[in-house]
Amino acid sequence: MQKILRIATVIMTCLAVGYFSSIVTRENIPTWYADLNKPSFNPPNWVFAPVWTALYILMGYAAGRVWNKLEVDEINVKKAFLFFLIQLALNALWSFLFFGLQNPFLASIEIILLWLMIYETYKQFKNIDKIAAYLLLPYLAWVSFATVLTFSVWYLNR
């Protein structure tokens, strides 16, 4: 039961971070964001919520799997979890930089740090639980796309 509770706790934490980040996002979509020039490959607005929800669930499940290895490999689990928490904080920060401060340039710089932290989290998870690491690959792919998108929005609106 403790294993399921750990996984559920991390999934709910990830979803909560996503929810609170979306508050500043939702406020600015019909106003500031609607007036920005966007690249031709910009997805429709409705795509983002289901994609992020799925990614937060995958992230949480992956981190929960790693947390469940605490008794086996405490030092590496704690190190991996630290990277996970840092990337989760950077994930939330992006929304505040891009939508809250309405600063695509700052968000473009920050998303590179986010990508690097996700990649490091992937590597740390892979040393502990390969399935957990693989569960982060869709997130890494989406943030790769989001990086190009963020830079494109900045470039088109500078």
Image: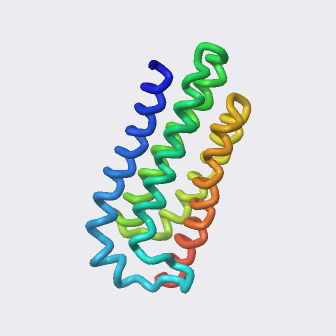
In the rendered image, residue 51, in percent from the top left (x then y), is placed at 48, 60
Q: Is residue 54 left or right of residue 27?
A: right
Query: Horizontal and vertical percent for residue 18?
Result: 39, 51
Which residue appears at 58% of the width and 24% of the height? 78
Image location of residue 155, percent across then percent down: 54, 80
Q: In this view, does 14 lie above or below 35?
A: above
Residue name at image x 43 percent, y 61 percent: 50
Does residue 22 lie above or below 149 as drawn? above
Q: Residue at the top extreme?
A: 71
23 lies left or right of 119: left
Q: Is residue 72 left or right of residue 100?
A: right
In the rendered image, residue 110, in percent from the top left (x then y), is placed at 53, 57
Question: Residue at the location (38% across, 39% down)?
Answer: 12
Front residue (pair 11, 153): 11
**In this view of the protein, which residue sits in the foreground, 84 or 45?**
45
**In the figure, residue 30 lies in which quadrant?**
bottom left
**Residue placed furthest toward the front:** 1
Q: Which residue is drawn at 71% across and 36% down?
A: 130
Residue 94, relative to residue 27: is it above or below?
above
The N terminus, quarter of image: top left
Q: In which quarter of the image is residue 149?
A: bottom right
